[in-house]
Amino acid sequence: MYAALWRVLPGPVWVRILILIVLVAVVLVALVQWVFPWAADTLLPQESTVGG
């Protein structure tokens, strides 16, 4: 998978590395902005209390 991605990217090695860094940053920002908050709201465990 990673080898196929590496072959598809254009340019010399330093441009490929820069593109990969930008892609990873975009994916991380998307996860933090949209996926993690959605999952936290959707997949909340049942509220319970210990003791009583």
Image (tube, rainbow, N blue to C red):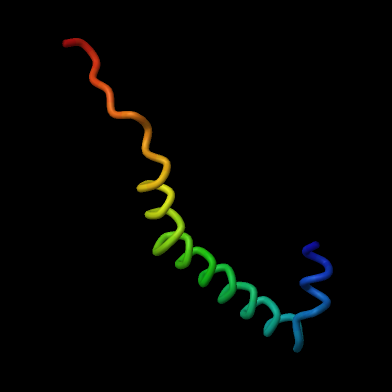
Residue 47: percent from the left, percent from the top? 28, 28
User: Is 52 positioned to the left or the right of 29 in the image?
Assistant: left
Q: Say which of 2 and 31 sits in front.
A: 31
Q: Is residue 25 above or below residue 8?
A: above
Residue 9: percent from the left, percent from the top? 75, 81
Residue name at image x 23 percent, y 20 percent: 49
Residue name at image x 34 percent, y 29 percent: 46
Q: Quadrant of the N terminus?
A: bottom right
Q: Say which of 43 and 25 sits in front.
A: 43
> How many labels sit on residues?
0
User: Is 14 positioned to the left or the right of 25 in the image?
Assistant: right
Residue name at image x 39 percent, y 64 percent: 33
Question: Within the image, what quadrant is residue 22 found in?
Answer: bottom right
Q: Is residue 28 above or below residue 46?
A: below
User: Is 45 positioned to the left or the right of 10 in the image?
Assistant: left
Q: Quadrant of the C terminus?
A: top left
Residue 5: percent from the left, percent from the top? 77, 71
Q: Say which of 34 and 46 sits in front.
A: 46
Q: Is residue 45 above or below residue 29?
A: above
Q: Residue furthest bottom?
A: 11
User: Is 9 positioned to the left or the right of 20 in the image?
Assistant: right
Q: Residue furthest left?
A: 52
Q: Is residue 8 above or below residue 37?
A: below
Question: Within the image, what quadrant is residue 29 found in?
Answer: bottom left
Residue name at image x 83 percent, y 76 percent: 7
Question: Within the image, what quadrant is residue 19 found in?
Answer: bottom right
